[in-house]
Image: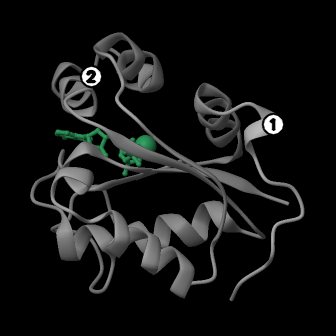
Amino acid sequence: MERTLAIIKPDGVSRGLIGEVISRLEKNGLNIVAMKMLHMSKQQAEGFYNVHAGKHFFESVTDFMSSGPCVVMVLEGEGVIDKYRKLMGATNYKDAEEGTIRREFATDIEKNVVHGSDGPQTASFEISYFFNELEIVKNSTTIG
Ligand code: ATP
Ligand code: MG
């Protein structure tokens, strides 16, 4: 069974979009098997986005991700990595499809409300960055 890491970023939390995002996950049959709120330090944000170290937006995106609390979640299900990426929409909301979370709520390429792992290896690293196995529900009820 595939897992992915989802984050409601600081802009989503501060704008009151936690319920909106979670509602879309539920309506689309994506199972949440772990969830918590946390406020990353700058160093923790740098560790999380380490794959982007050296890119022109690294400094700014790690400042942003450590600027306030996030909601971090583990989603589980067949093909959940791609299903959730589709629901989020493209990184730049201007390129995102109609009806996606980023198209409807993002305000710029950086403040794009949500994060989702982009593949199985990234998902595994990102989930273990925030959760241990005891914090992930087993045999969860399947919705959708
Ligand atoms: P995420 O990893 O957050 O799910 P993504 O996989 O769609 O987003 P990445 O290329 O991994 O996009 O970039 C990580 C994050 O860094 C983006 O979501 C966005 O917040 C920020 N970012 C990416 N590209 C840019 C850019 N050109 N300018 C400013 N910020 C950017
Ligand atoms: Mg990414």
Question: Which residue sits at x=82%, y=67%?
Answer: 140
Choose between 44 and 136: the one closer to the eye. 136
From the top left corner, tell me how far across and down residue 67 is, in percent: 19, 30
Disc 1: residue Cβ within 8 A of ligand 1's nearest atom: no
Asked whether, in this view, residue 6 is left or right of residue 3, the answer is left
Choose between 59 and 10: the one closer to the eye. 10
Alpha-carbon neighbours of circle 2 within 10 Å: few (<14), some, or many (≥20)?
few
Alpha-carbon neighbours of circle 1 within 10 Å: few (<14), some, or many (≥20)?
few
From the top left corner, tell me how far across and down residue 68 is, in percent: 23, 34
Amino acid type of the residue that numbered disc 2 sits on in the rendered structure:
Lys
Q: Residue furthest left?
A: 107
Question: Which residue sits at x=60%, y=26%?
Answer: 129
Q: Residue beneath label 2, please?
A: 55
Question: Which residue sits at x=19%, y=28%?
Answer: 57
From the top left corner, tell me how far across and down residue 3 is, in percent: 72, 54
Amino acid type of the residue that numbered disc 1 sits on in the rendered structure:
Leu
Q: Which label is found at residue 7?
A: none
Q: Residue beneath label 1, please?
A: 134
SS assignment at label 1: helix
Cα gap from disc 2 to disc 1, whole angstroms: 35 Å
